[in-house]
Image (cartoon, coloured by chain):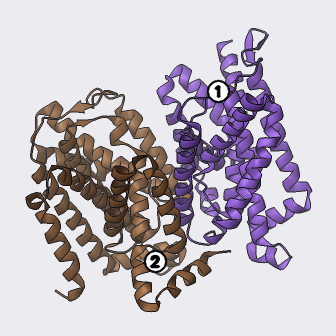
Chain colours: A purple, B brown
């Protein structure tokens, strides 16, 4: 029974982790930018939903689309005006510029929102359902469902629409995609915008199940990074699967080994996977 | 000794004189500055020359810290023994993990080293001999001049090593690996041996820096010894100055750390903001680092800025 509970906790947590990593994997796979500011974008989305809820009284789940729209515009402009200037240089440079962005966004958030812990607490925040002795927190279940829904929508967008085909073509070969009429500046900005919107949604849901501060970004970036690698960069559904693996491993580790080991487990798994599957890693690099 | 080395030598002599002309604050500033400069230079040996972005250099630094701390606090051994012990520990670790991890490329290598750092940090936090989570306290000393000069000597040694590398066959092999590893292997470079040698050399300097700094701060714990943020600093400073150059990482460390300290003391609240903005602007206008910027400006003036932006924009 305990094990089943851990499994449920892990799966619910893992779905949200998967959503966090979706945007990072998309931007990484298509633009070849390892976005260290991804966690900061998640954090900003969390604040957007928080203020829509506390300021305007909008239910957090209804506020998600608004936060996503805002984050899309922000991400679009960021890529169009800033990151497009540097996107063709070495990986270290894009790492560095996104680190600079992370520092700036974290500072601005701290200045504008203060360092207080904020949690989004709708009336149903503490509600549970109990099924066969397993407790399922409703808010987490809803967050999990939304995460799956968004991953499914992203899959549909990438595989069933013209825009998605352009994005996938660009990821495979920028020059060839250009020859077929893809305008890369626009497409890169749209892709980064989608990544930011997904980060925003993840942030809103994160605010419902946990607490947001201006500093959550760094650890969420690290987690998204790990999951993006485990899941691979080409398929949103496998990214969600990667999130589930990490979510389950972490909740099992914090029970059996103690909470200090939760992060070690996710990193340890990662190193094992990397070393055991070198052919794939080499090809992807 | 050609004139090329005149300015750096003069700079080193001036730095060496700081303990006699500066005050207490300047010493503290200088010791940390020399620490990060030496670490950035050590990172440069692998990261700058081979392009393998290591986030595990804080691991080697941490092993140097703990080698010294365990020897001094647990076994009452002299400082020098601890320093050597830490360096051996770090080099062994580099040798052992180098083989599986250096097969990974690009971001995969980066994240694997980051994972290694997290794992070792947790391991140390559970070892009795390393003081578990609480950390260790080293015997107190007040020899700031010694620490300062020690770190300066280490920085000079690391810089000389890099200067040798950049003009040697070994360095050419490392650069070939950075430009195209498969081609380098075909040309007869023993890529595995070269990469591991660079990693071990890098780990040696990182561990020595850690050992000296541990004795200086006298209190250490896993969180500060295996701090990934310290590793991020090494990368930023080396890349800012010019990765794969001899003086770039040192210049980058000096400039960035000075800017940060100046901002922190004058407009403390917005220091982080300006630091971030400096990094963003630096990447856009000097993607090849400060050294290349200075060289390019001399050669073609302000046109250099436009040219580099044009080269990397979409």
Quadrant of the rendered structure where residue B314 is?
bottom right
A94 vs A4, left or right, is left
Q: Report which residue position mark 2 lands on.
A: B176
Q: Report which residue position mark 1 lands on.
A: A119
Total numbered labels placed on residues in the image = 2
Q: Chain of mark 1?
A: A
Find the residue positioned furthest to the top. Answer: A133
Which residue is nearer to you in this view: B55 or B261? B261
Residue at figure coordinates x 38%, y 79% from the top left: B172
Whole-number angstrom distance, CA of label 2 to CA of label 1: 52 Å
B277 vs A209, left or right, is left
For label 1, the SS is loop
In the picture shown, does residue A16 fall above or below A277? above
Which residue is nearer to you in this view: A285 or B309? B309
In the picture shown, does residue A282 fall above or below B289? above
Image quadrant in which the N terminus of chain A is located: top right
Q: Pointers 2 and 1 in contact (CB under 8 A)?
A: no
In the picture shown, does residue A48 fall above or below B33? above
Label 2 environment density (alpha carbons within 10 Å; few <14, some 14–19, many ≥20): many
Q: Nearer the viewer, mark 2 or mark 1?
A: 1
Q: Chain of mark 2?
A: B
Label 1 environment density (alpha carbons within 10 Å; few <14, some 14–19, many ≥20): some
Residue A268 x/y as whole percent: 51, 40
Residue A123 x/y as whole percent: 77, 17
Image quadrant in which the C terminus of chain A is located: bottom right
Which residue is nearer to you in this view: A248 or A111? A111
Q: Are marks 2 and 1 on the same chain?
A: no
In the picture shown, does residue A268 fall above or below B270? above
């Amino acid at each position: 029974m305990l094990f089943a509970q851990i499994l449920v906790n892990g799966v619910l947590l893992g779905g949200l982790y998967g959503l966090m990593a979706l945007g990072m994997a998309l931007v990484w796979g298509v633009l070849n930018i390892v976005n260290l500011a991804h966690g900061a974008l998640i954090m900003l989305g969390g604040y957007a939903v928080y203020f829509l809820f506390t300021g305007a009284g909008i239910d957090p789940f209804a506020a998600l689309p608004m936060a996503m729209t805002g984050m899309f515009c922000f991400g679009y402009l960021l890529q169009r005006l800033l990151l497009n200037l540097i996107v063709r240089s070495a990986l270290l440079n894009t790492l560095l510029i996104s680190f600079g962005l992370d520092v700036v966004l974290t500072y601005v958030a701290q200045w504008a929102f203060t360092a207080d812990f904020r949690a989004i607490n709708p009336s149903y925040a503490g509600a549970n359902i109990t099924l066969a002795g397993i407790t399922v927190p409703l808010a987490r279940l809803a967050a999990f469902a939304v995460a799956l829904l968004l991953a499914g929508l992203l899959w549909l967008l990438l595989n069933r629409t013209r825009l998605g085909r352009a994005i996938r073509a660009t990821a495979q070969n920028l020059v060839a995609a250009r020859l077929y009429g893809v305008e890369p500046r626009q497409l890169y900005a749209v892709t980064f915008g989608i990544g930011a919107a997904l980060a925003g949604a993840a942030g809103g849901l994160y605010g419902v199940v946990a607490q947001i501060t201006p500093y959550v970004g760094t650890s969420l970036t690290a987690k998204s990074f790990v999951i993006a690698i485990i899941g691979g960069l080409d398929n949103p559904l496998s990214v969600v699967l990667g999130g589930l693996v990490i979510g389950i491993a972490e909740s099992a580790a914090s029970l059996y080994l103690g909470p200090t080991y939760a992060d070690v487990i996710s990193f340890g798994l990662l190193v094992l996977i990397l070393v055991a599957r070198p052919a794939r890693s080499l090809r992807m690099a | 000794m050609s004139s090329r080395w005149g300015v750096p030598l003069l700079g080193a002599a001036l730095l060496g004189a700081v303990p006699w002309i500066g005050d207490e604050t300047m010493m503290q500033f200088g010791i940390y500055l020399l620490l990060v400069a030496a670490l950035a230079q050590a990172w440069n040996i692998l990261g700058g020359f081979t392009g393998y972005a290591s986030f595990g250099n804080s691991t080697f630094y941490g092993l140097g810290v703990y080698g010294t701390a365990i020897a001094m606090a647990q076994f009452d051994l002299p400082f020098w023994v601890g320093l050597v012990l830490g360096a051996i520990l770090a080099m062994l670790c580099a040798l052992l993990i180098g083989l599986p991890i250096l097969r990974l490329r690009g971001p995969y290598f980066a994240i694997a080293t980051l994972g290694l750092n997290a794992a070792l940090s947790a391991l140390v936090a559970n070892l009795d001999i390393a003081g578990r989570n609480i950390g260790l306290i080293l015997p107190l000393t007040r020899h700031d001049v010694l620490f300062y000069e020690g770190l300066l000597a280490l920085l000079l040694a690391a810089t000389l090593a890099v200067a040798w590398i950049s003009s040697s066959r070994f360095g050419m092999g490392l650069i070939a690996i950075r430009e195209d590893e498969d081609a380098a292997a075909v040309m007869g470079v023993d890529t595995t041996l070269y990469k591991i040698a660079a990693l071990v050399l890098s780990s040696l300097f990182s561990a020595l820096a850690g050992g000296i700094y541990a004795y200086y701060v006298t209190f250490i714990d896993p969180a500060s010894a295996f701090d990934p943020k310290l590793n991020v600093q090494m990368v930023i400073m080396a890349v800012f100055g010019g990765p794969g150059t001899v003086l770039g990482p040192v210049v980058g460390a000096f400039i960035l750390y000075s800017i940060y300290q100046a901002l922190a003391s004058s407009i403390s609240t917005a220091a982080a903001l300006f630091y971030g903005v400096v990094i963003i602007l630096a990447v856009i206008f000097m993607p090849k680092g400060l050294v290349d910027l200075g060289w390019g400006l001399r050669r073609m003036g302000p046109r250099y800025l436009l040219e580099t932006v044009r080269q990397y924009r979409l």
